[in-house]
Image (cartoon, rainbow, N blue to C red):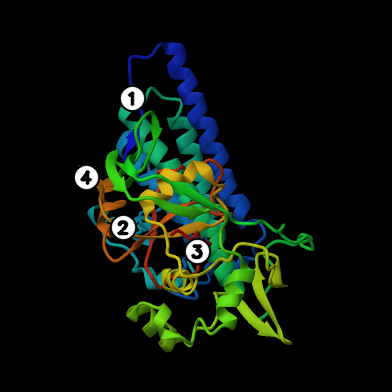
Amino acid sequence: MSYNLHHPTTTTAEFHTAKTTFSTRFRKIRQQTECICKPLEIEDYVVQPVVDVSPPKWHLGHTTWFFETMILLPYFADYKVFDANYNYIFNSYYESIGARVIRTDRGNLSRPSVENVYQYRKYVDQAMEAFLQTNYPDEVASILELGLQHEQQHQELLVTDIKYILGNNPLFPPYLKVDQTAKSEVKTSKWISIDEGVYEIGFEGEGFCFDNELNKHKVYLNTYQIASELVTNREYLEFMNEGGYENFRHWHSEGWDWVQKNNSKAPMYWYFIENQWHNYTLNGLQVVDLNAPVTHINFYEAFAFASWSGKRLPTEAEWEVANGYFEWGKRWEWTQSAYLPYPGFTKADDATGEYNGKFMVNQMVLRGASVATAENHSRPTYRNFFQTNLQWQFTGIRLAQ
C-alpha cells in the first residue's frame, strides 16, 4: 500500500498541527467502528455464517491489532502488548508476521470475550493517543494513515458482514429501527458519450492512495457510451421475469454452473412472499423498492443482465475516464476488468506489501463506493476487487455500450 504524502521540512507549528490532525482523525475513526457495532446484541458479535463473513468481534480486534503491531511495537519505546495470544487470533493474512487462526475458524472464538476485546481497544487507543504526542519519525505518518484507511475499509466490511449475519437469521431482525416508508425517486438513465482517444488513469498527486492505484498511465479507448444511472430493482426484475436465470445464453459458462449449483433465481436477500418480492435490508424485511439500485449481485449476474440487455459492463478505464459525468457512491459497480497490476506496480518490502498485490488473480474490479463506505474514503481511482461469485457486498450495475 502506498501513501503519497510528501514530507518536506516542516516548522514546529506545522508538526504540531499534523499531530493534532492525526490524533483527531484517529479518535473519530476508532469511535465510528464502535458506533457501527452499537445496535448489536452481544450474541451477534461472534457469529460467522460463511467463510467470507467475519464476526464483528474479530473486526474490532483485528483493526486494533494493526495499530499495535504496525506502530506501537516497532516505534513506541517500552510498549507492552495487551495479550501475547492476540497476534495469533487477530492477524488476518500477513505471512511475514506469523501464524494465525484460519479464516474459517474465526466464528469459533468464543474467547476472548466481547468485553475483553473492547478492553483491548481501549488499551491500544490510550497507548496510541500517547504515542501521537511524541516526536515520531516521518515514516510513521504513512503507516498511521494506512491504519486509518484500513479501519475504514473494515467499517464497510462490518456493515456488510452484520447484514449477512442478521439477514441469515430466520427472524430477519433489523439492524436499524428507522422509518423506511419513503421510496426511491424515479430517475431516467441517459447515455453519456465519450470520444475515442488516449486517456490517463491511476492516482497522481498529493494525499493517500493504495498501491494498486499506482502508477498513472495512458490507455486508449474506443468511442463508447456509459449509463448515467445504475440499474434498478425494477429493471432487474424484468430480467428475472423474462427467464434471465433460466437462459444459459446470457451467462459465462462458470456463471451458468454457479446458477445450476445454487438454484439461483434472484439477488441475495430476495424472497418471494405472498406473490410479492421482498428483500432483507438493514431495516429488516421490506417489499422491494423497485426504483432503488439493485444490489447484492455478483459478477456473473451483472454480466448476464448486461448480456440480456444487449449491452455490456464498462471496463475500469472507461469507468474512471467517465466518472465525472455521473453520480456514484451508492453501490460498488462491477466492471469487466480483471484485477491486475498497473504498469510499474511495486510492492513494499515490509508486511504492508502483502496488502493488495498478492490478490491480483481470479478477481474482478469494482469501482466507486457504496452506502456502507466511510465518508471521503473512496475516490475515482479507488480499485476494489472481488471474486466473481460473491454477492454479500453492496454491489450494483452500470451499463455501457
- In x, y percent, where is residue 366? 42, 57
Q: How far is the residue under mark 2 from the one under mark 3?
A: 17 Å
Where disc 1 sits, the SS reads loop
Residue denoted by label 2:
339
Give how far across and how far down residue 358 sits, in percent. 25, 57
- Give the mark nearest the N terminus, 1 or 4: 1
Q: Amino acid at mark 4?
A: Pro
- What residue is pinned by disc 3? 393
Instruction: Give whichever of 136, 259 is nearer the camera.
Output: 259
Q: CA distance from mark 2 to mark 1?
A: 28 Å
Residue ID for mark 1: 6
Task: Give the CA distance from mark 3 to mark 1.
Answer: 34 Å
The kind of secondary structure element at disc 4 is loop
Q: CA distance from mark 1 to mark 4?
A: 22 Å
Say few, some or many: other residues with alpha carbon within 10 Å of mark 4 (under 14 / 14 to 19 / 20 or more). Answer: few
Label 3 element class: loop
Residue 335 seen by the camera? yes
Pair 2/3: label in front: 2
Rendered residue at 50%/62% (across/down): 397
Q: Check whether the beta carbons of the residues at disc 1 and disc 4 lie within 8 A of each other.
A: no
Q: The residue under label 2 is which amino acid type?
A: Tyr
